[in-house]
Amino acid sequence: QAVDDAYGKLTDAERTHIAGVMFFGNPVFNPDQNVVDEGTYDSNLSGVLIKFFGEHPSEVARKWAPSVRSWCTRGDPICNYSRVNLARCTKISALCPHLHYVQLGWTGKAAQWSADRLKRQPALKATRLN
């Protein structure tokens, strides 16, 4: 959520300098942003902070969507909140999907996506400081 909050405060000019932003298990996950959403999430469930505290769902403007990805996996009570998901994670926390993005392969997919984005960025020009 810290990354989502920080990204939301950037100006358009600042965002042009960012190759890519990735969220994992975002508590303000918006299942209605299929242009940025990745994973096996339940499209009927949103983030826990939306349900409990009335936070606004994460929203990425269409023009910035190519540089943002938000991963959520089915059963993760943080980004796909339901009482059942929360109870399942409370009883056997080691099996909680929120703790297993690496094992599920999402971080590897995110790394590949990020590397592909970086390859398409214009080369940086070296400047000499006097």
Image: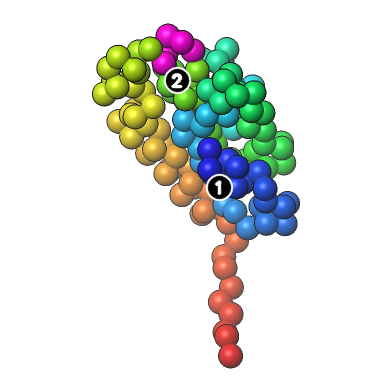
Residue at position x 56%, y 26% from top?
A: 49
**Percent position of residue 123, x then y:** 57, 65
Q: Which residue is drawn at 72% across and 52% down?
A: 11
Reading the chain from its start, which is encountered first: label 1 or label 2? 1
Q: In the rendered image, which residue does mark 1 sit on?
A: 20
98 lies left or right of 1: left
Considering only vertical position in the picture, is 22 above or below 42? Answer: below
- Residue 126 seen by the camera: yes
| Residue 29 in sight here | no
**Which residue is identified by label 2?**
77
Q: Which of 55 and 6 is in front in this view?
A: 55
Q: Where is residue 117 in the image (x, y as percent from the top left)?
A: 53, 48
Marks 1 and 2 sit apart, C-alpha to C-alpha, by: 25 Å
Q: In this view, does 24 lie to the left or right of 44?
A: left
- For label 2, the crowd category at 10 Å Cα-Cα, with few meaning under 14, some 14 to 19 and many 20 or more, is many
Amino acid type, residue under disc 2 in the picture: Pro
Residue 67 has which mark? none
Q: Residue at x 72, y 41 (%)?
A: 63
Which range is magenta? 82-86
Quadrant location of residue 128? Answer: bottom right
Query: Does residue 58 appear to the left or right of 2 in the view shown?
Result: right
Magenta stretch, main secondary structure class: helix
Extreme-top residue of the structure: 84
